[in-house]
Image: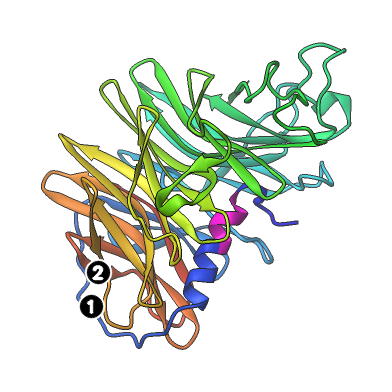
C-alpha cells in the first residue's frame, strides 16, 4: 500500500511525466536570498525545509514516500509549522499517524476517542493565534475507530474521513452522502476514502479542499465550515474536445467572497486536463487532453488569478504558470519540470517545484518572477512542494 493513498494519482503524474520526458544537463543558477523565504520539500526521502536557502532537516524514515501539498507549510515569525505524517504501529490498514511539526518537534494528532489518529495531515493554516490542520483519519472495522453517527448506521468497513484539527481537537468533515461516510448509492462499495489537499482560513470561516476517491476515480469538492460543496456536478464530467472523466481537487484559495479551487480532470482514454473552479464554475486551462496537464495550486492577488502546475509540451513536462488563464512555461529547451505551489508578495511571484537533472535526479527549484533558483545540487534528489514568503 502506498503510504499516502489519496495522493497516489498526483505522485504517479509527477513521476510518470518526468520519466516519459527527455532529460537535461544541469547548469548553475545564481542563488537569490530573499528575506524570510520558506520552502518545504523532500531530500533523499527526508522531510526538509529551506529558510532563505539554508536547509533544515525535519524527519527521515526509509521507505516512506512523502508527497506534500501547496499548503503543507506555514510560517509565523520564527515559527515553522509543517503538516505531515509518521509511521505508526496502531493500525495495520493505516500504519501512519498525522503529525504537526513545530520548529522540528513533532506532535501526533488525536482521534475523536483521544487516541493517536491513523492517517495523514496534509495542510496547515494559522489565524488569530489558532493552528488549523487538515487531513484524513483512517478507520477499520474496530468500532472505536469507525466514525459512527449511530450504532445502526451502515458504513463501509474500511476507509478514511476528512478531518480538521483546531489546536489539536479533531472535527470530522461530513462526506458526500446522506449521512456522511454512509455506504450510499453514491459509493456502492465497501471502501470509502476521503482525500484532503488544502486549507484556507478567512475570518471565522475554514475552507478545506479535497474530495472522495473510490476505485480508480476521484470526486472533487471543498468544505466550508464542515459543509461539503460539490465541484464535480455529474460524476461523468464534460471536458474539452468531447472528453469526459472525473475531476479531482489539488488546492484552495479564498479572496473575499470568492472561492478558488485548483485541480485536474482525469479524462477517459486520455491524459489529465488542468482546471480551476471559481465559486464552483470550472475553468479549463488547457484543451489538450492527449498530452496532459495538471493545476497544483492557486493564488489570488487583487484581480489576478495565478495557477501553477505542469503541462506536457513537445514530450517535456513543463512547470507552468497561468496568470488569468494565460500560460507561461517556466522552463524550455530540454528541461523537464513541475510547479507545485505559488505565492505573490508585493510585485514578486514565487513558484516552488522541481526540475529534472541528468542522469536521474530531481532538484528542488523555486522561480522568482520566472527566474529559477536551485535549492540543492544534483547529488541529492530533492523536490519542493510548498512555499511561503514573509
Spot occupied by residue 295 in the image (x, y as percentages of width and height)? 39, 51
x, y (%) of residue 317?
A: 40, 70
Q: Quadrant of the N terminus?
A: bottom right
Label for residue 29? Answer: 1
Apparent side of residue 25 relative to residue 171 in the rendered image (left or right): left
- Label 2 residue SS: strand
Q: Nearer the viewer, residue 119 or 209?
A: 209
Residue 372, disc:
2
Discs 2, 1 touching: Cβ within 8 Å: yes
Among the 4 quarters of the image, the one containing residue 2: bottom right
Q: Residue at x 26, y 82 (%)?
A: 28
Residue 36 relative to residue 87: left or right? left
Q: Earlier in the sequence, mark 2 or mark 1?
A: 1
Query: Does the magenta segment cover residue 9?
Result: yes
The foreground one among 169 and 296 is 296
Looking at the image, which is closer to me, 79 or 14? Answer: 14
Residue drawn 68% across and 16% down?
Answer: 178
Kindly give the residue lying farthest to the front in the view shown. 242
Q: Is residue 226 rendered to the left or right of residue 300? A: right
Question: In the rendered view, would you say 136 is above or below 362?
Answer: above
Marks 2/1: CA–CA distance: 7 Å
- Density class for disc 1 (Cα within 10 Å; few <14, some 14-19, many ≥20) is few
Q: Which residues are the magenta region?
A: 7-12
Amino acid at each position: 500500500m502506498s503510504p499516502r493513498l489519496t495522493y497516489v494519482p498526483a505522485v504517479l503524474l509527477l513521476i510518470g511525466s518526468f520519466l516519459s520526458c527527455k532529460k537535461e544537463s544541469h547548469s548553475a543558477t545564481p542563488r537569490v536570498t530573499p528575506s524570510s523565504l520558506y520552502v518545504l520539500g523532500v531530500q533523499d526521502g527526508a522531510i526538509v525545509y529551506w529558510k532563505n536557502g539554508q536547509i533544515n532537516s525535519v524527519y527521515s524514515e526509509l521507505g516512506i514516500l512523502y508527497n506534500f501539498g501547496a499548503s503543507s507549510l506555514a510560517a509565523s515569525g520564527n515559527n515553522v509549522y509543517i503538516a505531515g505524517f509518521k509511521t505508526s504501529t496502531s493500525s495495520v490498514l493505516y500504519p501512519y499517524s498525522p503529525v504537526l511539526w513545530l520548529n522540528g518537534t513533532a506532535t501526533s494528532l488525536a482521534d475523536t476517542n483521544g487516541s493517536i489518529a491513523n492517517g495523514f495531515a496534509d495542510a496547515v493554516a494559522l489565524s488569530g493565534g489558532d493552528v488549523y490542520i487538515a487531513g484524513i483519519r483512517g478507520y477499520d472495522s474496530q468500532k472505536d475507530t469507525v466514525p459512527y453517527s449511530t450504532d445502526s448506521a451502515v458504513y463501509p468497513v474500511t476507509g478514511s474521513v476528512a478531518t480538521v484539527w483546531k489546536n489539536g481537537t479533531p472535527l470530522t468533515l461530513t462526506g458526500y452522502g446522506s449521512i456522511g461516510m454512509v455506504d450510499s448509492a453514491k459509493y456502492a462499495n465497501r471502501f470509502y476514502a476521503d482525500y484532503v489537499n488544502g486549507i484556507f482560513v478567512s475570518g471565522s470561516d475554514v475552507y478545506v479542499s479535497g474530495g472522495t476517491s473510490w476505485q480508480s476515480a476521484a470526486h472533487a469538492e471543498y468544505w466550508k465550515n464542515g459543509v461539503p460543496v460539490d465541484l464535480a456536478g455529474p460524476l461523468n464530467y464534460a471536458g474539452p474536445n468531447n472528453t469526459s472523466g472525473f475531476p479531482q481537487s489539488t488546492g484552495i484559495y479564498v479572496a473575499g467572497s470568492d472561492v478558488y479551487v485548483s485541480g485536474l480532470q482525469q479524462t477517459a482514454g486520455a491524459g489529465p486536463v488542468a482546471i480551476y473552479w471559481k465559486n464552483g464554475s470550472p475553468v479549463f486551462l488547457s484543451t489538450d487532453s492527449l498530452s496532459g496537464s495538471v493545476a497544483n495550486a492557486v493564488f489570488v492577488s487583487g484581480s489576478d488569478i495565478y495557477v501553477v502546475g505542469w503541462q506536457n509540451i513537445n514530450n517535456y513536462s513543463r512547470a507552468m504558470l497561468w496568470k488569468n488563464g494565460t500560460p507561461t512555461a517556466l522552463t524550455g529547451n530540454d528541461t523537464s519540470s513541475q510547479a507545485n505551489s505559488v505565492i505573490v508578495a508585493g510585485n514578486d511571484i514565487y513558484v516552488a517545484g522541481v526540475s529534472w537533472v541528468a542522469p536521474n535526479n530531481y532538484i528542488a527549484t523555486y522561480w522568482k518572477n520566472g527566474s529559477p533558483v536551485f535549492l540543492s545540487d544534483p547529488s541529492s534528489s530533492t523536490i519542493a512542494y510548498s512555499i511561503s514568503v514573509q
